[in-house]
Image (tube, rainbow, N blue to C red):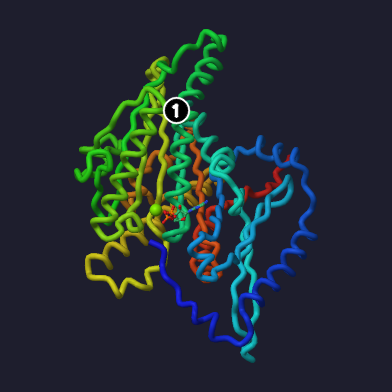
């Protein structure tokens, strides 16, 4: 649920703060547009083709919604595309007061791999992010996609759209994959029966997990004696075509909504997990491919936990711990790949990261790619939350060190 804001903040001031911020933002926009080097579309495309990072960090700022516009809310976030040598960036403008009481707009910027603004379609976001996880998963690797951000910023909107686009492309790609692997001409490839797809959908709420396909059955995540992660009691369904997969996704989303309505907005407090397991029937010895699609709990700060009852406060702690552990795991794994020394990936520290164990293991044979989409509410009243979200994802962008060992 979107939070209500106190607009008296605007109305109290003699100087129209809106006018002031907008004027400052316009000045700023002109400056950065002049500064950012021109990149042609071809160059940007070339950059995308070369993209082989294990971790991809994106932001998506949603539009200001009609009801918000009516209340006088306006956006304070700006994004710029990256190029061959430049990073994509997101700029957050916040209003602050100087010691003499005069207002001042402070701009903070964050570099990301892709930045999408309110004009970006779900297809555009998907094409640059989740789409690249499909060949990884079909090849027996692990692809994970996380939507993270404040409640009301567009996590579910983005994830649901992406899940449907994945359903559309997965079976198509399975055919193409088979064709490439076996050299079978396109017209002789009739179906994707070379692969078996199994889907489950559940949510992690505090230290409990509930099946979203057989709601509200409880399921448990544990590591078995062989070190394999088991989701005990979960209902898993085999799917044979995009339609079946889309129906399952809709069923899970519907149960999550119902649960949220009856149990006091659980959707902002739970992590929803859609897992697709992919078995290659032609290479039975090969590892199974995995796609993890996660709509994370709202990242708003724990500051308001004093208003909650004991159980809710504990839940809030669990959420913060799992989000913090997730950050450490993604970052440390990225560092481990680059380092010759051992880097500890603390995936056992939360249920969420334990579930994702295979995504954090280092393997010379199994490809692994993680995409994080931070969603932002562009409102001028939410810049504090937006900055928190951006500070959360910033450390995940691990730069590949330039080595001087050329001899
Ligand atoms: P969250 O899951 O982060 O709490 P939602 O996905 O429920 O947020 O989005 C909150 C509201 O904003 C919804 O009404 C949704 O339809 C709308 N919304 C989110 N992202 C977009 C977008 N990119 N374009 C248009 N509307 C959006
Ligand atoms: Mg949601």
Q: Quadrant of the C terminus?
A: top right
- Residue 395 percent location from the top left of the image: 54, 57
Instruction: Please tell me how crowded label 1 is: few (under 14), some (14-19), or many (20+) other residues with Cα within 10 Å.
Output: many
Q: Which image quarter: residue 99?
A: bottom right
In the displayed structure, would residue 45 be above or below residue 58?
Answer: above
Per the image, the residue denoted by label 1 is 140
Residue in the foreground of this view, choosing between 59 and 139: 59
- Residue 280 percent location from the top left of the image: 41, 21
Residue at image position (41%, 42%) is 293
Question: Does residue 182 appear to the left or right of 311 in the view shown?
Answer: right
Residue at image position (40%, 55%) is 325
- Residue 118 percent location from the top left of the image: 58, 54
Question: Helix, strand, or loop for circle 1?
Answer: loop
Q: Which image quarter: residue 303?
A: bottom left
Residue at image position (41%, 63%) is 2
- Residue 61 percent location from the top left of the image: 55, 56
Residue at image position (51%, 81%) is 9
């Amino acid at each position: 649920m979107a939070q209500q804001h106190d607009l008296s903040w605007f109305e109290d001031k003699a100087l129209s703060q809106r006018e002031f911020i907008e004027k400052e933002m316009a000045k700023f926009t002109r400056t950065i547009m002049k500064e950012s080097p021109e990149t042609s579309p071809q160059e940007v495309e070339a950059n995308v083709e070369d993209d082989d990072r294990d971790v991809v960090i994106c932001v998506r700022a949603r539009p200001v919604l009609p009801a918000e516009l009516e209340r006088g809310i306006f956006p304070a976030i700006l994004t710029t595309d990256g190029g061959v040598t430049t990073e994509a960036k997101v700029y957050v403008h916040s209003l602050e007061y100087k010691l003499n009481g005069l207002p001042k707009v402070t701009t903070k910027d964050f570099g990301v791999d892709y930045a999408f603004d309110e004009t970006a379609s779900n297809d555009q976001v998907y094409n640059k992010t989740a789409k690249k996880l499909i060949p990884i998963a079909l090849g027996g690797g692990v692809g994970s996609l996380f939507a993270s951000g404040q409640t009301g910023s567009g996590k579910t909107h983005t994830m649901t759209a992406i899940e449907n686009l994945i359903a559309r492309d997965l079976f198509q790609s399975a055919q193409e994959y088979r064709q490439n692997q076996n050299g079978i001409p396109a017209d002789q490839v009739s179906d994707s029966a070379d692969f078996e797809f199994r889907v489950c959908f559940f949510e992690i709420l505090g230290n409990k997990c509930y099946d979203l396909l057989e709601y509200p059955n409880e399921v448990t995540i544990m590591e078995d004696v062989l070190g394999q992660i088991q989701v005990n009691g979960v209902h898993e369904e085999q799917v044979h075509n995009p339609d079946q997969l889309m129906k399952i996704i809709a069923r899970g989303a519907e149960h999550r909504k119902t649960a949220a309505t009856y149990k006091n907005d659980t959707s902002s407090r739970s992590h929803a997990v859609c897992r697709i397991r992919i078995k290659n029937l032609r290479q039975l010895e090969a590892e199974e491919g995995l796609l993890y699609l996660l709509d994370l709990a709202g990242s708003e700060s724990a500051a308001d936990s004093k208003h909650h009852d004991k159980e809710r406060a504990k839940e809030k702690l669990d959420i913060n711990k799992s989000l913090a552990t997730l950050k450490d795991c993604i970052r440390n794994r990225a560092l481990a790949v680059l380092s010759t020394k051992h880097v500890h990936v603390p995936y056992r520290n939360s249920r969420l990261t334990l579930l994702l164990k295979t995504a954090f293991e280092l393997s010379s044979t199994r490809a692994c790619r993680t995409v994080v989409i931070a969603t932002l509410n562009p409102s001028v009243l939410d810049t504090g939350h937006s900055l928190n979200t951006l500070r959360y994802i910033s450390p995940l962008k691990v730069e590949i060190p330039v080595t001087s060992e050329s001899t």
